């Protein structure tokens, strides 16, 4: 495939790609507005025409794999179909051309939407309080631990430790550090669930919270979650749930009913807002009654005349985590998605997501090692150890899948499974698509047995072959520089 | 449901291969008492009905398309050319995720590389990341870099920095050992004019100071005289963080040329309408000595196995999924789609376009300042301003805003919501969208206020 030059290489002095109105006073020198010492003397941006820009970015887009290209079974990321109607509602003038500093009476619709979305998420997840401010799951985690910290501090002391299972997302320990806590790892047992005896042993008066992921990153539902919540509460600790895997549970169980105190929902995952190539996301945070006083402000309120307002928070609030009310554009899309699905549609999400994952599990378990062979939830984690002994690593399997037209699964995560292949098909793939995907992975297993160099040399059909990441890190070239 | 393609027959076949009779059997790990709650939700809406419903909610807002908008305060109503959104709607961009597999993500990766290049050019700093959630969190992360880098905990923030950013930074600082001290670097004279007091910032900088945070132009729209503050910070080895908007940067001296170490800001208004404040995208740029402490994603150029140029996410050992509890930031995405829009728009504007755009805003703001109805209103600054300035009103700004609403005018932002003593100060912003008749209508309506 033809390579696309860096846009700077298309530059030609004097070109401009936008048609702006003329200056009113072109004769006036800029130093008549600004002191001479404050004026910049060079601006080395590219100079290109509009058609150059359009073609450049269209060509770049064609180098991407996306959900709209084919199945994207990236575990823990919930790469489901992003309905097009969401892009239409997100762009309605009345929902996009509104300013965060408009008075409340001019933005009743926006506040109403926030209020109703909070209500829907509250009902779906089983928590009375919701804030829509966090911009992503990781910021939701930060907000959640900060609420816990605020509540414990008010009571007595913030405490010093957070328990985190060894199967957790990397954001969890990083979040604990940002919130001033020390992470303490909890091992998983042989059934793929958190080891409850270790939890019991580690829960002491210094533990502020335990951060659970339900279902966990092995795709396994934590069957002892209620007991863990009880133990944590008895020790004066709180239970945080990383809601990245809500797609497995939506409509089937409300995590709040299980005893969890606080949980974020990744609206770009379960509620399909889309992923955007890596953001913007939205990390709504759901909390139990006792954490509501500490939520970030302003909060949305409604009075008896159905008038909505932003209420600035009191001194117990942890403060803002976003300059305004969160990633509103994503919230409009999530709201659209929930209404489109309704009660029955939401349940069919979990039903089909879990069915599809289990179908993958049984279709592949004779060819790939399955460290935890039990009914899984929305994702299944295989290990590539058998192929590794044949000379093809999990990375090689992933790269070979590209040649079969699929996005690879999440690899080498969770860390507790060697050569992990974490597959999350989602509910929006059909049986036929999954059959094709299964066929590809079976065929790759054959290739590994026959001639593992086929895998090691993959991909051969992508725009580029394998990239030299070591040199990229050793000799960083992070920006274009003029030759 | 339309979005789930499996039919009953598909499900029957799949269950049979799993060895189960019903879907319910897949959920038996969930405690029985809590399984299958009766959710109080309505049934699905058709696409037609959901659109009608969203349109009716949209109609309950007064869109900026129905108003003359002079509100800014960090969120500006710029015109974004049609091709920007058309390109952002390429679903190869918006339905992809973080480019974990570079061979099939070169589009996203090269965009990030070009984005980083443009942010570096704009700020005249050495390295930039792939973007942060918004300007406020970018500032919070910059403060974290500065305190970790210096091993100091005292953070000075000029009070003229966007109050929303300061709020977010305070939240991030509160659980770790960082003390954020806002410094009142302005006074209000007897006429209500805001007077710069940079010497207060300067005198607060000492050997314990991790960083000094400045904004150019400041939240009130004027360009502060920062040369001495920056020199003092440098003498004390304190890090200089500059908050700056990309549009004025077309004209004013960039943070790197002033001696700043880190620059952050918000790019939303290059990408689309204000969207009620989000999603935005924060940029983060720094001198090369901070390279290993930069938070978030960074793309780098390399070669593939056939020697062709390509891009990867790089310097990954800084990030949370590898460092885990030793990571100083938990960010694991960026605002890729918004950053894409900013890259497209900045590329198309280029050098002349961005300067022209900034100049149009400046022209409009200066024309407006000349036409303030001076019998009762007064310009609130005597410093050089770009596209925004405070106006001193004879009545509270909140009342001015309410009184102009029936005229279809959003005249600006009430500064009293941030500084009670500035209750009569209205912050007015101008973009290239502001026309001369619009300025005249604003000033005439203000002049006619009872």
Image (spheres, coloured by chain):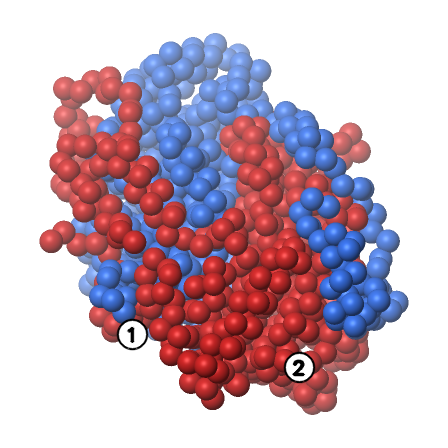
Chain colours: A red, B blue
- Label 2 neighbourhood size at 10 Å, few (<14), some (14-19), many (20+)? some
Q: Where is residue B71 in the image (x, y as percent from the top left)?
A: 45, 29
Q: Which residue lies furthest to the front in this view?
A: A450
Q: Residue furthest left?
A: A483
Residue at image position (50%, 22%) is: B65
The mark total stands at 2
Q: Is mark 1 on a helix, strand or loop?
A: helix
> Is residue A104 shown above or below B338?
above
Q: Could you tell whether B426 is left or right of A360 in the image?
A: left
* Residue B324 picture location, percent across and down: 48, 75
Q: Where's residue B337, x and y in %?
A: 44, 47
Foreground label between 1 and 2: 2
- Label ID, residue A372: 2
Chain letter of disc 1?
A: A
Q: In which quarter of the image is residue B442?
A: top left
Residue position marked by numbered label 1 in the rendering: A470
Q: Residue at x 28, y 66 (%)?
A: B304
Instruction: Give the vertical position of A418 relative to B173 (above or below).
Output: below
- Residue at the (29%, 24%) spot, across then down: A20
Residue B185: percent from left, percent from top: 34, 46
Question: Are marks 1 and 2 in one subunit?
Answer: yes
Judge by depth and name the residue closer to the eye, A475 or A428: A428
Q: Which chain carries label 2?
A: A
The span from disc 1 to disc 2 (Cα, nearest Å) is 33 Å
Between B306 and B272, the one nearer to me in the picture: B306
Nearer to us in this view, B442 or A386: A386
Comparing A210 with B101, the one in front is B101
Check contact, mark 1 vs mark 2: CB within 8 A.
Answer: no
Does label 1 or label 2 sit earlier along the sequence?
2
Instruction: Please report the residue visible at 36 percent of the width from the left and 65 percent of the height from the top.
Output: A460
Q: Can residue A92 be seen in this view?
A: yes
| Structural crowding at the residue carrying mark 1, measured as other residues with C-alpha within 10 Å and reported as few (<14), some (14–19) or many (≥20) | few
């Amino acid at each position: 495939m033809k390579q696309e030059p860096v846009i700077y290489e298309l530059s030609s002095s004097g070109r401009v790609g936008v048609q702006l109105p003329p200056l009113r006073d072109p004769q006036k020198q800029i130093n008549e507005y600004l002191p001479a010492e404050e004026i910049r003397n060079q601006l080395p941006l590219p100079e290109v025409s509009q058609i150059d820009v359009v073609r450049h970015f269209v060509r770049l887009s064609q180098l991407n794999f996306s959900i709209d290209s084919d199945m994207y079974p990236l575990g823990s990321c919930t790469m489901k179909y992003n309905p097009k109607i969401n892009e239409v509602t997100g762009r309605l003038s009345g929902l996009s051309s509104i300013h965060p500093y408009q008075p409340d009476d001019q933005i009743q619709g926006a506040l109403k939407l926030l209020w109703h979305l909070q209500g829907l998420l509250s009902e779906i997840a089983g928590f009375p309080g919701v804030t829509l401010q966090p911009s992503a799951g990781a910021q939701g985690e930060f907000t959640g631990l900060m609420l816990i910290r605020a509540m414990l501090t008010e009571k007595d002391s913030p405490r010093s430790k957070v328990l985190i299972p060894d199967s957790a997302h990397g954001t969890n320990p990083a979040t604990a550090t940002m919130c001033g806590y020390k992470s303490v790892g909890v091992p998983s047992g042989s059934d793929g669930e958190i080891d409850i005896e270790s939890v019991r042993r580690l829960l002491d008066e210094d533990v502020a919270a335990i951060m659970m992921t339900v279902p966990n990153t092995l795709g396994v539902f934590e069957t002892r979650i209620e007991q863990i919540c009880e133990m944590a509460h008895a020790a004066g600790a709180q239970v945080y749930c990383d809601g990245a895997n809500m797609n497995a549970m939506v409509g089937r169980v409300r995590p709040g009913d299980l005893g969890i105190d606080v949980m974020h929902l990744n609206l770009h995952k379960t509620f399909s807002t889309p992923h955007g190539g890596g953001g913007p996301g939205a990390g709504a945070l759901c909390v139990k009654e006792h954490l509501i006083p500490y939520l970030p402000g302003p909060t949305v309120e409604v009075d008896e005349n159905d008038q909505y307002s932003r209420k600035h928070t009191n001194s117990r609030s942890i403060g803002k985590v976003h300059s305004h009310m969160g990633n509103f554009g994503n919230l409009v899309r999530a709201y659209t998605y929930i209404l489109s699905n309704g009660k029955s549609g939401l349940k069919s999400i979990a039903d089909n997501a879990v069915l599809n994952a289990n179908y993958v599990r049984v279709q592949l378990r004779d060819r790939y090692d399955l460290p935890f062979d039990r009914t899984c939830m929305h994702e299944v984690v295989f290990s590539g150890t058998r192929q590794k002994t044949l000379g093809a690593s999990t990375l090689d399997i992933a790269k070979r899948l590209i040649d079969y037209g699929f996005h690879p699964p999440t690899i080498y995560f969770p860390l507790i499974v060697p050569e992990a292949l974490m597959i999350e098909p989602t509910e929006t793939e059909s049986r036929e698509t999954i059959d094709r995907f299964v066929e590809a992975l079976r065929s790759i297993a054959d290739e590994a047995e026959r001639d593992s160099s086929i895998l090691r040399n993959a991909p051969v059909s992508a725009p580029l072959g394998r990239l030299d990441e070591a040199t990229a890190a050793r000799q960083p070239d992070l920006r274009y520089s003029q030759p | 449901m339309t979005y789930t393609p499996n039919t009953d027959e598909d499900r029957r076949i799949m269950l049979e291969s799993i060895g189960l009779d019903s879907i319910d059997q897949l959920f038996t790990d969930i405690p029985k008492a809590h399984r299958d709650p009766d959710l109080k939700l309505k049934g699905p809406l058709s696409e037609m009905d959901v659109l009608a419903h969203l349109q009716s909610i949209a109609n309950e807002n007064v869109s900026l398309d129905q108003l003359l908008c002079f509100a800014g305060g960090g969120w500006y109503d710029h015109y974004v050319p049609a091709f920007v959104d058309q390109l952002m709607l390429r679903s190869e961009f918006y339905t992809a995720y973080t480019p974990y597999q570079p061979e099939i993500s070169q589009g996203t990766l090269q965009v990030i590389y070009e984005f980083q290049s443009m942010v570096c050019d704009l700020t005249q700093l050495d390295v930039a990341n792939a973007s942060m959630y918004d300007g406020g969190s970018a500032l919070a992360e910059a403060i974290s870099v500065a305190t970790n880098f210096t091993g100091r905990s005292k953070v000075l923030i000029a009070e003229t920095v966007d109050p929303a950013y300061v709020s977010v930074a305070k939240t991030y600082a509160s659980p770790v050992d960082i003390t954020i001290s806002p410094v009142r670097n302005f006074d209000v004279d007897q006429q209500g004019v805001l007077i710069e007091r940079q010497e207060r910032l300067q005198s607060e900088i000492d050997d314990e100071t991790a960083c000094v945070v400045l904004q150019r132009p400041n939240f009130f729209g004027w360009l502060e005289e920062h040369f001495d503050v920056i020199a003092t910070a440098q003498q004390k080895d304190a890090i200089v963080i500059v908050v700056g908007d990309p549009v004025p940067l077309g004209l004013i001296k960039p943070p790197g040329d002033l001696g700043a170490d880190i620059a952050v800001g918000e790019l939303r208004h290059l990408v689309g309408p204000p969207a009620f404040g989000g999603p935005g995208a924060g940029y983060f740029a720094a001198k090369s000595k901070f390279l290993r402490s930069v938070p978030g994603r960074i793309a780098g150029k390399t070669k593939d196995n056939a020697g062709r140029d390509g891009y990867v996410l790089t310097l990954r050992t800084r990030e949370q999924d590898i460092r885990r509890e030793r990571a100083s930031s938990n960010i694991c995405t960026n605002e890729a789609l918004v950053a894409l829009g900013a890259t497209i728009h900045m590329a198309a504007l280029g050098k002349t376009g961005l300067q022209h755009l900034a100049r149009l805003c400046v022209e409009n703001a200066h024309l407006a300042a000349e036409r303030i109805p001076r019998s009762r209103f007064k310009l609130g600054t005597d410093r050089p301003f770009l596209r925004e300035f405070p106006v001193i009103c004879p009545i509270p700004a909140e009342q001015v805003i309410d009184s102009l609403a029936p005229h279809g005018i959003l005249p600006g932002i009430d500064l009293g919501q941030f500084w009670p003593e500035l209750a009569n100060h209205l912050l007015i912003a101008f973009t290239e969208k502001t026309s001369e008749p619009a300025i005249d209508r604003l000033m005439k309506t203000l002049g006619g206020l009872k």
